[in-house]
């Protein structure tokens, strides 16, 4: 137990973090191919992020796919380098996180090389991805993090994502072992997250109230469910 409490989660801001789920099947897309529904949900999500971020005491707001330690409940994908699509040893199954520019501020995620996702990573911009150090080692064995920036990867479809940054490993998905992770901009990914990670300056329970007020103003049909904090 003492060893477990000393684990480095890779998320130094976790003590001030709350994860809130937004539930309303009629509002959220039921399949990645439903482009109209995806567009509507992205617009709603963006408005909620802006509104919550303007709340006093809120430090950062980032969409997330799942709460901490979701295990099998998270999203997975097989990431492959474009220059070696058939090399199974370089095709790791990674945790997929669909988020925004504020994710590092919300969680304390450490940048190792390049940059994190930016506001410029819009739907009409070149597809970008940020990978964890564990994912980078699997994708490009023996290469430094700085050398991985600029390489291209895919999830098996026609879209090629350029790696714009490499970040530290975290235990967001699995407590005992860091899982290789790829971070995509929610404006560029066909699937959309339905949770918000909200970092506060004080008691994280205040984040839930901030989201409830924002939902009341922006999308009152949504149900707000606290999933962690």
Image (spheres, rainbow, N blue to C red):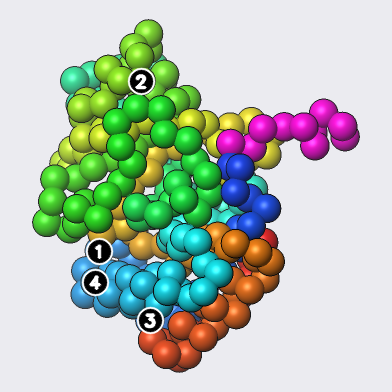
Q: Secondary structure at mark 3?
A: loop
Asked if marks 2 and 1 touch (Cβ < 8 Å), the reply is no
Q: Secondary structure at mark 1?
A: loop
Which residue is disc 4 drawn over? 39
Which mark is drawn over residue 145?
2
Specify which label sits upstream in the sequence, 2 or 1. 1
Asked if marks 4 and 2 touch (Cβ < 8 Å), the reply is no
Q: Measured along the vertical axis of the image, is residue 227 above or below residue 116?
A: below
Which residue is disc 3 drawn over? 27
Position of residue 151 measured from the top left corner of the image (x, y, whole percent): 22, 25
Which quadrant is the N terminus positioned in?
top right
Position of residue 17 measured from the top left corner of the image (x, y, whole percent): 61, 58
Mark 1 Cα-neighbour bin, 10 Å: few <14, some 14–19, many ≥20: few
- Of tags 4 and 2, the one toward the viewer is 2
Which quadrant is the C terminus positioned in?
bottom right
Q: Note whether residue 188 is visible.
A: no
């Amino acid at each position: 137990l003492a060893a477990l409490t000393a684990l480095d989660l890779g998320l130094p801001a976790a003590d001030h973090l709350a994860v809130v789920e937004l539930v309303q099947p009629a509002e959220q897309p039921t399949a990645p191919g439903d482009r109209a529904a995806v567009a509507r949900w992205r617009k709603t999500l963006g408005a909620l992020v802006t509104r919550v971020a303007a709340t006093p005491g809120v430090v950062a707001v980032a969409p997330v796919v799942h709460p901490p330690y979701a295990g099998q409940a998270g999203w997975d994908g097989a990431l492959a380098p474009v220059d070696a699509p058939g090399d199974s040893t370089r095709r790791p199954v990674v945790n997929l996180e669909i988020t925004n520019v504020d994710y590092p501020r919300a969680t304390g995620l450490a940048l190792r090389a390049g940059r994190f996702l930016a506001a410029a990573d819009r739907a009409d911009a070149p597809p970008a991805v940020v990978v964890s150090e564990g994912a980078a080692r699997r994708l490009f064995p023996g290469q430094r993090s700085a050398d991985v920036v600029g390489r291209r990867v895919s999830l098996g479809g026609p879209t090629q994502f350029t790696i714009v940054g490499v970040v530290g490993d975290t235990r967001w998905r699995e407590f005992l072992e860091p899982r290789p992770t790829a971070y995509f901009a929610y404006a560029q990914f066909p699937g959309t997250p339905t949770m918000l990670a909200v970092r506060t300056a004080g008691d994280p329970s205040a984040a839930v109230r901030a989201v409830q007020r924002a939902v009341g103003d922006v999308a009152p049909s949504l149900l707000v469910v606290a999933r962690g904090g």
